[in-house]
Amino acid sequence: ILTSISGIKIKTSDEWETFRRPEILNLMKEYIYGVRPIERPQDLSFKTIAQSNKYNSDNILFEKKEICFCGYSFPVYSYYPISYTSALPSIIYIMHEFQENNCDLENSIECVNLPIKKIVNNGYALFIMPTRKLAPDFDHQANFSQGIYPLFETKRSENSWASISAWSWGASRVIDYIETDSRLNSSKVVLVGHSRGGKTALWCAATDSRIKCAISNNSGCTGAAMHRTKKGEHIKDINRTDWFCENYKKYNDFEYMLPTDQHMLIAAIAPRPCYVASSSEDTWADPQAERESCRLASCVYELYNKKG
């Protein structure tokens, strides 16, 4: 992790940021997560399409927003404490389709996937970003003619972005909104995801330094867990989905040939905090392999005089 492609030993945080970190991110874009054709669109705008005090008894203001660009938009559901004394820190939750199907975000504050009331009443603004309209993922299979893909590309290649990168792109657009809202402290943004959402949270935090803390739950293979020595799900298993670029499929059964491993993804978030959790008996995600990633990423945090 601290040796560049050319064999140079990385000894300082400046060398890490200037040389090794960009190397790692470029390799991951090319061979795993895909290359985005665009970052922030020039015509990006935001609309609040619904606002309600219907959760007033819980001290919560509800707003539904649309993030708009290129004649397209995707929804974000937001919750603010009605009473607060200073600009609020924000939590963004990436909600994949399976979770969205088990919630009624339009009409209810009760959500099986996260405690909305507890989060907001502890002084955070909460943003829930459903992934369905950004990049549909029905049965883990993408339709690259839907969502945001056709807005920015006319032909796909082996390193084209796919679901995880598209959802990560969307989360960065939510941060673009946060920077415009005077109620919010845009220097305090936490990104959270579970399972494929956890993979997205890690990739987004690695590529967007405005995220001050990443929380990954059960992200497993191509999330927090090491490929080498991993139990449970492997690259050939996860590539039954359309979450990653086509180049990644070349490494089915060849984890040891991949030029990166997932401790490097966590290290790319340094020196910002990264919290990794998994169910202790989820051998498919392999919490021990996730723990090993955290341990091996620690040497990069130590370059910043952090404990790791």
Image (cartoon, rainbow, N blue to C red):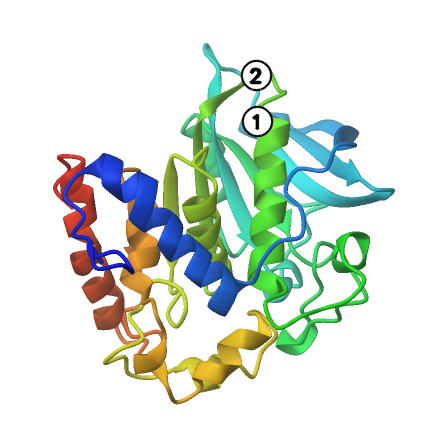
Q: Quadrant of the N terminus?
A: bottom left
Camera-side residue of 304 and 177: 304
Asked if residue 124 is positioned above or below residue 246 in the image, the reply reads above
Mark 2 vs mark 1, CA separation in Å: 9 Å
Q: Is residue 148 left or right of residue 267?
A: right
Sequence-first tag of 2 and 1 = 1
Asked if residue 112 is positioned above or below residue 170 in the image, the reply reads below
- Kindly check if marks 2 and 1 are in contact, taking CB atoms under 8 A apart as contact: yes
Residue drawn 65% across the image and 56% down it: 131
Camera-side residue of 91 and 242: 242
The x, y position of residue 245, in whole percent, is 57, 70
Residue drawn 71% across the image and 64% down it: 136
Q: Nearer the viewer, mark 2 or mark 1?
A: 2
Residue at the outermost front position: 6
Q: What kind of element bears circle 2?
A: loop
Among the 4 quarters of the image, the one containing residue 141: bottom right
Q: Give the crowd class for mark 1: few <14, some 14-19, many >=20 residues within 10 Å.
A: many
Tell me the kind of residue under disc 1: Tyr
The x, y position of residue 242, in whole percent, is 61, 74
Q: Give the crowd class for mark 2: few <14, some 14-19, many >=20 residues within 10 Å.
A: some
Q: What kind of element bears circle 1?
A: strand
The x, y position of residue 250, in whole percent, is 49, 83
Residue marked by disc 1: 80
Residue marked by disc 2: 183
Kindly tell me whether residue 50 is visible in this rendering. no
